[in-house]
Image (cartoon, rainbow, N blue to C red):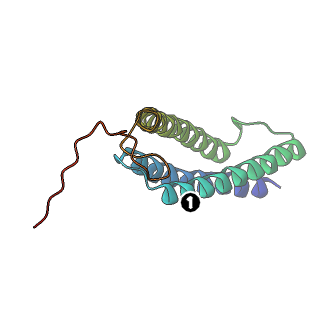
């Protein structure tokens, strides 16, 4: 049973390592001036899957702890305690990276909102042609007939 808990902790750490790589790539993608939406969506899907895997392994950990009458940080079990401390460090790093990605995403969202306002403002102002392709100038513009 103790081996089961150790295996679960190792799986948690492995999944956190995978999440670290995904978060690093997400930050890299969001650091570009222009975001590749397809790549970002793929990363988001992978991240969701890894988070679900983490939740499942964590539930397994809690159940095994209950069966063994143990509780993290496993002070009486040095091997388990070492794994637990690495998990805590990885979790903190993932949290920090996720906050950085969130900040970068907010910057892109504000930029998009600004562009959207500009586009809406220009669409609302009178242009040369109506939506049907007809001229709106009502004879106010000069017309030149040029023949060559």
Work out whether residue 60 or residue 102 is closer to the camera in this orientation and state it: 102
Instruction: Please state the total of marks drawn on the protein image.
Output: 1
In the displayed structure, does residue 89 sit left or right of residue 25? right
Residue 87: x %, y % from top left: 60, 43
Towards the viewer: 130 or 13: 130
Q: Please determine whether, in this image, residue 56 is positioned above or below residue 96.
A: below
Q: Which residue is mark 1?
A: 42
Q: Residues within 10 Å of mark 1 (few under 14, many from 20)?
A: few
Quadrant (top left/top right/bottom left/bottom right) for the N terminus = bottom right
| Residue at 51%, 60% in the rendered image | 38
Image spot of residue 4 (x, y percent) = 78, 57
On screen, residue 143 versus residue 131, left or right, reads: left
Q: Residue at x 87, y 42 (%)?
A: 66
Residue 42 place in picture, x, y as percent:
56, 60
* Relative vertical location of residue 24 with respect to residue 123 in this rendering, above or below: below
Which residue ends up furthest to the right in the rendered image?
Answer: 67
The answer to which image quadrant residue 85 occupies is top right
Secondary structure at badge 1 equals helix
Front in this rendered view, residue 60 or 30: 30
Residue 5 rendering spot, x and y as whole percentages:
76, 52
Name the residue at 10% across, 67% down. 148
Looking at the picture, tell me which residue is in the foreground, 83 or 32: 32
Q: Residue 75 occupies which quadrant of the picture?
A: top right
- In the image, residue 116 sits, relative to residue 33, either above or below, namely above
């Amino acid at each position: 049973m103790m081996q089961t808990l150790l295996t679960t902790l190792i799986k948690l750490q492995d999944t956190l390592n995978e999440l670290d790589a995904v978060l690093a790539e997400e930050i890299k993608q969001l650091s570009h001036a222009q975001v590749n939406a397809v790549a970002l969506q793929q990363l988001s899907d992978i991240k969701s899957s890894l988070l679900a895997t983490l939740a499942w392994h964590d539930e397994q950990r809690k159940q095994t702890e209950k069966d063994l009458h143990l509780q993290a940080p496993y002070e009486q079990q040095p091997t388990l305690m070492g794994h637990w401390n690495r998990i805590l460090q990885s979790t903190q790093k993932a949290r920090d990276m996720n906050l950085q990605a969130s900040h970068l995403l907010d910057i892109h969202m504000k930029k998009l909102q600004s562009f959207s306002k500009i586009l809406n403002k220009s669409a609302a102002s009178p242009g040369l042609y109506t939506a049907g392709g007809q001229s709106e100038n009502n004879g106010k513009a000069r017309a030149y007939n040029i023949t060559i």
